[in-house]
Image (cartoon, grey):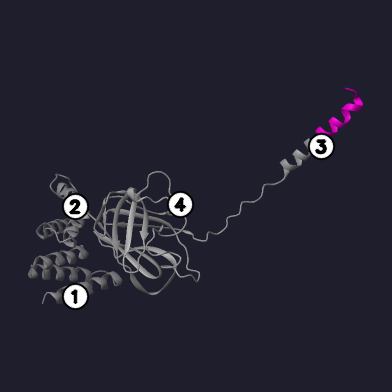
Amino acid sequence: MTTRMLRPVIALIAGSALVAGLFAQAPAAPQIKFPSASPQGVIKQRVGITDIEVTYNRPSMKGRKIFGGLVPYGQVWRTGADAATRVSFSTDVKLNGAAVPAGTYELFTIPGESEWTVIVQAVKDKAQWGSYAYDPKNDTARFTAKPAAFPYPVETFAINIGEITQTKATLALFWESTRVPITVEVDTVGALVPQIEAVMASDAEKKPWFPAAMFYYENNLDLEKAAAWIAKGLEAQPKAFWMHYRHGLILAKKGDKAGALAAANKSKELAAAQPPGELRDEYLRLNDALIASLK
């Protein structure tokens, strides 16, 4: 090939290299994080010794009719927006009486005017989008819940865990003017009592006298043991005015009014000797109320 013939080829190669270089040097488009129309929400709550976590996306009304409109009655709903709502339990639970083993689940609902169906399915692989792939054969549990009118409109769909005790709580769905409560029961007593009994019967040098006594008191268990355990705790902390007060509560519940009155008076005496402040005043009030209830 002659020099004259090579010149166009060389020029083409050089031009291509120049263009490639220009593109290589051009800055990448900046990554823009746009807001979600239905932002994700996460709630975590411990009930007794059970950890509950809910992950869901939160759509808003935006002037639309929701139940019976955007969310039709009688059809499976993802219970939120975008990916199906997820709920996990660290121990076995009961949802409105239905047994649900510990694990992570997708939460679906079928809204109705007077009754909702609530469905949980164990998560098998990745989260499904919406409820389009829902298959009833995969249901872990299915139960009903009663919707109730809410006193003011809720613009953005919300899930809340409230009314918490050591053995139960309420997981509630809120949107538009509707509240759907689901009772969550956890077997805290069944899980802890064998552990407490084993520790208290052992030769352990330090035992949880006070928390064990209060657990039995609060869950209406063996009050004789509760009273004996808190008395042992007071042997190690004789000036613990707050423990004397709770000793009085246990004795009162057990029916020992004289013992309860003595404990309350001892607590009040020790509290009165504390530096002035809210803690002192609180225990003076608490003991006055306990003493009055025993007369």
Q: Earlier in the sequence, mark 1 or mark 3?
A: 3
The magenta stretch is 1-15
Identified by mark 4, the residue type is Trp
Q: CA distance from mark 4 to mark 3?
A: 48 Å
Where 287 sits versus 50, above or below?
A: below
Q: Could you say whether the residue bearing mark 2 is in a helix, strand or loop?
A: helix
Between residues 97 and 166, which one lies in front from this camera angle? 97
Q: Earlier in the sequence, mark 1 or mark 4?
A: 4
Identified by mark 1, the residue type is Ala
Identified by mark 2, the residue type is Gly
Q: Position of residue 251 (x, y in %)?
A: 11, 65
Q: Is residue 5 magenta?
A: yes
Task: Assign the N terminus to one quadrant of the image.
Answer: top right
Q: Earlier in the sequence, mark 2 or mark 4?
A: 4
The residue singled out by tag 3 in the image is 15
The residue singled out by tag 1 in the image is 289
Q: Quadrant of residue 162?
A: bottom left
The residue singled out by tag 2 in the image is 190
Identified by mark 3, the residue type is Gly
Where 293 sits versus 3, above or below?
A: below
- Secondary structure character of the magenta stretch overall: helix
Q: Quadrant of residue 231?
A: bottom left
Answer with left or right where residue 111 lies relative to residue 254. Answer: right
Q: Position of residue 121 (x, y in %)?
A: 34, 50
Q: Could you say whether the residue bearing mark 1 is in a helix, strand or loop?
A: helix
Q: Earlier in the sequence, mark 2 or mark 3?
A: 3
**Crowd class of label 4 (few under 14; some 14 to 19; many from 20; radius 10 Å):** some
